[in-house]
Amino acid sequence: MRATAPARIDVRKTYKLFIGGAFPRSESGRTYEVTSAKGAFLANAAQGSRKDARDAVRAARSAQPGWAGATAYNRGQVLYRVAELLEGRRAQFVADVAAGEGLTERRAQDVVSAAIDRWVWYAGWSDKVAQVAGNANPVAGPYFNLSAPEPTGVVAVIAPQASSLLGLVSVLAPAIVTGNTVVIVASEDRPLPAISLAEVLATSDVPGGVVNIITGRTAEIAPHLAKHMDVNAIDVAGALGADGITWGELEADAAGTVKRVRRPAGDDEDSWAEAQSLNAILAYTETKTVWHPKGM
Amino acid sequence: MPRFEYAPAPESRAVVDIASSYGLFIDGEFVESASGGSLKTINPATEESLADVAVADESDVDRAVRAARRAQEKVWGPMPGAERAKYLFRIARLLAERSREFAVLEVLDNGKPIREARDVDVPTAAAHFFYYAGWADKLDHAGFGPSPRPHGVAGQVIPWNFPLLMLAWKIAPALATGNTVVLKPAETTPLTALLFADLLRQAELPPGVVNIVTGAGATGAAVVAHPGVDKVAFTGSTAVGKRIAKEIAGTRKHATLELGGKAANIVFDDAPIDQAIEGIVNGIFFNQGQVCCAGSRLLVQESVAEEVVDRLKARLGTLRVGDPMDKNTDVGAINSAAQLARITDLTKAGEEEGAVRWTADCALPEQGFWFAPTVFTDVSAAHRIAREEIFGPVLSVLTFRTPAEAVAKANNTPYGLSAGIWTEKGSRILAMADKLRAGVVWANTFNRFDPTSPFGGYKESGYGREGGRHGLASYLIEGSTR
């Protein structure tokens, strides 16, 4: 008589942070339990700390000049490549989104498709932003005078809480397309798509440090980023629906360093279906105007 | 070489009638302030008292905001852009017609030389109205989406260094886009804004579209805090800008902030030296250095530093400091006793920290607030005079060897408003302009302004742009939301 073969034990993934192109554990040694929308255990995610956020800012700062210095054509290619890899790993994102947001597989498929399409839409802007948002200025005098948008620098993004992938892509892609680098605080209760996205970024051509992802408690980490001297802009949309913090508090923290603040568009934390706009890109740009005399 | 003196060439003040006291301009009329409070505005060149000006308290600001709201909803918002445009064109023309009156009054209240008020401030203010007038019926073409909408009521707080020009920068785009305005001029320089109210009467602008509330910091704070204000526009210090950003955090008020600066003016060894010297002078001694984008940190390539500083000192020796009403005056009075004290304090710190001070040898009037053009050499990046905005006719000179060092020193500041580059090498200009973290970069020129040209800062020099197509964005709803 033959014994039945034991059921295969699946190999589970350890979810870690994403800083400077590497996947460290939190320096604090903490993790927290991530559950599905129905309450089932999914994973232990790293519970990032203030120090992790600082390290992420440092990584973002060192990566910024190189990323901004790449040609717009090159940035567009790199970002499009990310969309290719997202498509290739669609099944995993569908599973992550369905479990975390409590969606049917069919609905999760739609969300992932929308996220990938949005990424492609933003990728295509890289070499067009300056043409649309720049200007030759006809000043009254013999001067050559040109205005063009430039990246603001390091952007902190508090990722949307409810829309774990489409919301995340909607705030991440417009921030990096012009050459900013980013530190993201992932959705507190639904961080897994963010880490899966990190794996995509790590295996694409996006330079290490361009995107850094911290998982953990939004209310613990976000204020440090809002106050950080070396962060130039912050998207506070993700504070809607986060425990223990409001976007207004983060905006007040950001005032101390004259950070650029991108506010939530409305009070609905899950209205990301239409959230695709040129203004999302321009929110993290500065207009530089250069004058030079004309003469013979 | 013999020095020839100039004969006095004073402008006449007969062209201006200054009333002994002024009320607030609300809903198309001059009205008393509720509290009856007032402040005196004086001529900083003589300390002569010019007029009593009302101080608006919260209830006055409330009246002004309500008037602006009514006008926005009933008259100005619904009005076709083409009609709004015609009012703005009228204002531009009236400013040009009355330019001498405005220039003289600006000099009396501010202390700046008549040459600058007459040739820069007033014509540029008129040009701003002319430029934005043409946008009023073309907003669909501005690049901020179809049918962009105004915010509603704009609360605007402006500084004392360019009182009329800053008024124009604020009011022209606000009105062109269909917003109405409550404007708070600076406490030391309210008179041209009040004269502007008379110009609005001539233009027959509907009541309430522009309201002018005078007073000091508390009045400005009341404008910013008023719940009926939808959009805040502020030009002034970084410290106050941070307070405003904090005050409106968590509200749906939008803001543009034009804050402080500490611009680097970078001179390479192949620069056209004569032009550079003129550019340096214009960069830091224009308007007594009371300019947020003033080129207050001169970075000179080491190999030419001695020559540049020597020639600069020689040039500064020829600047004429004194009566701002004299048409030959280059450097006028400091705007207030408080500002003079701040300049004095910072220059003292410069000496104490070890920088070498040189001051132009010129006689200063006994009355009024004066500071002779001053240059500090041997300045290090850590000195207060290299880090803090002095906002006066004081230049700090630092040196560099390589372009990379120039970039590092230029960007080593929390500010990022403007920068200058002097070199004959075009490719170097473009590379430097790319690397400098500043909103305006002047190459082989300095302190140029034009209504078509966006102006505004990076980092702690504030956010938003004024001027040009970009200047419309912050007054339009589609220009600023997700």
Image: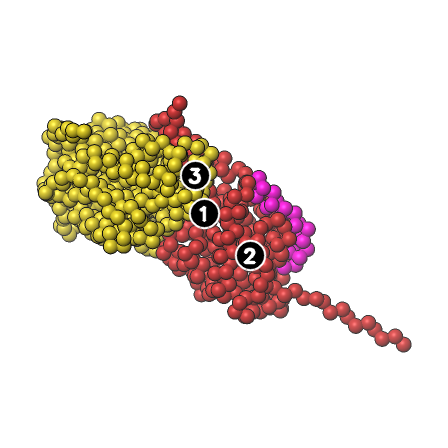
Q: Tell which tag, 3 or 1, sits nearer the viewer.
A: 3
Disc 3/disc 2 C-alpha distance (Å): 29 Å
Asked if both marks, 1 and 2, belong to the same chain, the answer given is yes
Tell me which amino acid carries mark 3: Ala
CA separation in Å, label 3 and label 1? 15 Å
> Label 1, on which residue?
A152
- Of all chains in the rendering, the one displayed in yellow is B
Q: Position of residue A143 (x, y in %)?
A: 38, 29
Magenta part of the chain: A73-96
Q: Residue at x 44, y 61 (%)?
A: A224
Give how far across and how far down residue B172 sits, in percent.
31, 36
Q: Name the residue located 41 percent from the left edge and 29 percent from the top edge.
A: A144
Residue at 48% across / 61% down in the picture?
Answer: A54
List the residue tagged with mark 3: B433
Could you say which quadrant of the image residue A19 lies in?
A: bottom right
Which mark, by number, is residue A20?
2
Q: Which amino acid type is marked by label 2?
A: Gly
Amino acid at pointer 1? Thr
Total labels: the figure holds 3
Query: In which quadrant of the rendered image does the N terminus of chain B lie?
Result: top left
Q: Position of residue A65 (x, y in %)?
A: 50, 47
